[in-house]
């Protein structure tokens, strides 16, 4: 909190009035980060000109760009949870909400405004994510686009197989 006070120029008393604990401060940051993350991803998907069946792949292009942004240091949610999750329930809840949003964005839950990624009806879950399911692996903090490229290739193969299987099951046109 002292470092935040010094960087912000506000008194420690004022900082604690606004954020009674480090967990509350981190939760506020994570909430804003989640909003920016969701808006950026949704905008990228909405503005893409790819066929609906390939919209899932746009997510991986977005991740590639995110991983190579100047100053990228990995996932703030994973890092905050790792540092404060055991002692700050509000941080744990913020990380869980973001994980739910991330999964809905991938189309594994139908109740999100960002399900446009999933609009082609692909049954593919977020398991192709370079971050992995259920946060078992940290986000790649190397600044390398390779994890996003690799995940995109895997998702592309699975998507092609799923689309091919759906076409085969539908049979010839009548």
Image (cartoon, helix red, strand yellow):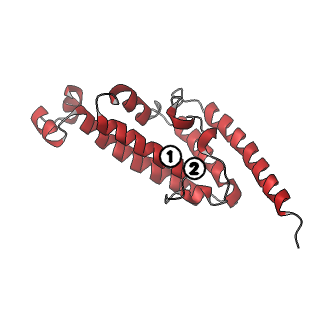
How far apart are the alpha carbons under marks 2 and 1?
6 Å
Residue 72 or residue 139, whichever sits in front: 139
Q: Tag on residue 18?
A: none
Q: Looking at this view, is 3 or 32 the one in front? A: 32
- Residue 149 to residue 120: above or below: above
* Residue found at the far bottom of this picture: 174
Residue 53, quarter of the rendered image = bottom right
Say few, some or many: other residues with alpha carbon within 10 Å of mark 1 (under 14 / 14 to 19 / 20 or more): many
Q: Residue 22 location, x and y as percent?
A: 24, 32
The residue under the point 77% across, 54% down is 163
Disc 2 element:
loop
Question: With 173 as the anchor, is 65 left or right in this view?
Answer: left
Tell me the residue at 47%/49% (across/down).
101
Q: Secondary structure at mark 1?
A: helix
Disc 2 crowd, CA 10 A, few/some/many (<14, 14-19, 20+): many
Question: What mark, if any, has residue 102 been given in the picture?
Answer: 1
Q: Which image quadrant for residue 14?
A: top left
**How many badges with numbers are in the image?**
2
Whole-percent x, y for residue 21 in the image: 20, 34
Q: Position of residue 168 (x, y in %)?
A: 85, 57
| Residue sitting at the far front | 169
Task: Name the residue at the left extreme.
Answer: 13
Q: In which quadrant of the rendered image does the N terminus lie?
A: top left
Give the residue at x 89% y 66%: 172
* Lateral position of residue 114 relative to residue 93, left or right: right
Which quarter shows the C terminus?
A: bottom right
Q: Relative to 59, is 160 on the left or the right?
A: right
Give the labeled residue for mark 2: 106
Q: Residue at x 32, y 28 (%)?
A: 84
Is the residue under label 1 in contact with that under label 2 (CB below 8 Å)? Answer: yes
């Amino acid at each position: 909190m002292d470092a935040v006070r010094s960087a912000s120029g506000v008194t420690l008393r004022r900082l604690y009035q606004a954020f009674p604990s480090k967990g509350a401060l981190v939760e506020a940051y994570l909430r804003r980060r989640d909003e920016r993350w969701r808006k950026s991803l949704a905008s990228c998907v909405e503005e893409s000109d790819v066929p609906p069946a390939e919209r899932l792949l746009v997510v991986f292009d977005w991740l590639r760009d995110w991983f190579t942004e100047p100053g990228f240091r990995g996932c703030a949610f994973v890092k905050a949870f790792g540092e404060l999750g055991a002692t700050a329930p509000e941080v744990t809840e913020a990380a869980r909400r973001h994980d739910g949003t991330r999964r809905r964005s991938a189309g594994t839950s139908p109740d999100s405004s960002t399900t446009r990624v999933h609009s082609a009806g692909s049954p593919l879950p977020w398991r192709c994510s370079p971050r992995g399911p259920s946060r078992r692996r940290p986000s790649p903090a190397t600044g390398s686009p390779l994890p996003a490229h690799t995940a995109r290739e895997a998702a592309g193969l699975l998507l092609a197989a799923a689309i091919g299987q759906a076409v085969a099951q539908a049979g010839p046109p009548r």
